[in-house]
Image (spheres, rainbow, N blue to C red):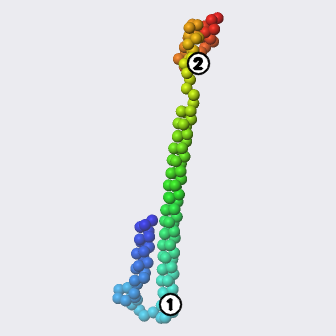
């Protein structure tokens, strides 16, 4: 994009420096009507180059603004993720810790251990183990 702007500026510069003298000039004297037409064409060319340059500059400004917006959104997302992680960690810390003596899948209270029940290492006990635990 910057190369395009530079080339357009170079074209505008060469158009503005066109002096019709020496190597750049016309060899034959033109009538006033032809001169006016030539001047009008040059003016149209200058105007179109200026407009193209303005359009490119506007596009570049728009790209910069969009890039800034994207960066802001990325930062907001990272902030929200951090807040979610912090909240999750806080909730994990608030969960009650199971004390020894409670029964959950595979965990057996001290009182039931003395009655001949079996620990299942974190797995759900089978029907057979329930019968053993109950003594049937």
Residue 128 can be seen in this image: no
- In the rendered image, the vertical position of residue 55 relative to residue 98, given as above or below: below
102, 58: nearer the viewer: 102
Q: Residue at x 40, y 88 (%)?
A: 20
- 24 to 76, vertically: above or below: below
SS class, disc 1: helix
* Residue 70, horizontal then vertical, whole percent: 52, 55
71 relative to 5, above or below:
above
Q: Name the image quarter holding residue 108.
A: top right
Numbered marks: total = 2
Of the residues tagged 2 and 1, which is closer to the observer?
A: 2
> Which of the marked residues, 2 or 1, is nearer the chain's N terminus?
1
Residue ID at (55%, 15%): 120
- Where does the C terminus fall, quadrant-wise? top right
Q: Which one is in front, 114 or 116?
A: 114
Mark 1 is surrounded, within 10 Å at the Cα level, by few (under 14), some (14 to 19) or many (20 or more) other residues, namely: few
Out of 5 and 85, give the one closest to the viewer. 85
Q: Secondary structure at mark 2?
A: loop
- Say which residue label 1 marks: 36
Residue 68 in picture, x, y percent from top left? 50, 59
Q: Position of residue 87 (x, y in %)?
A: 55, 39
**Residue 7 shows which numbered tag?**
none
Q: What is the x, y in percent for residue 2?
A: 43, 66
| Residue at which label 2 appears | 102
Q: Quadrant of residue 84?
A: top right
Residue under the point 51% across and 81% down: 44
């Amino acid at each position: 994009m910057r190369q395009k702007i530079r080339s357009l500026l170079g074209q505008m510069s060469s158009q503005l420096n066109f002096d019709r003298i020496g190597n750049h000039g016309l060899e034959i004297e033109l009538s006033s009507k032809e001169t006016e037409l030539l001047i009008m064409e040059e003016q149209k060319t200058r105007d179109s180059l200026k407009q193209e340059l303005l359009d490119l500059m506007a596009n570049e400004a728009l790209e910069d603004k969009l890039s800034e917006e994207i960066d802001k959104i990325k930062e907001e997302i990272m902030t929200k993720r951090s807040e979610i992680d912090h909240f999750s960690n806080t909730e994990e810390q608030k969960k009650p810790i199971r004390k020894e003596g409670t029964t959950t899948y595979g965990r057996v209270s001290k009182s039931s251990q003395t009655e001949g029940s079996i620990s299942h290492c974190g797995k759900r006990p089978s029907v057979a183990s329930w019968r053993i635990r109950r003594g049937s």
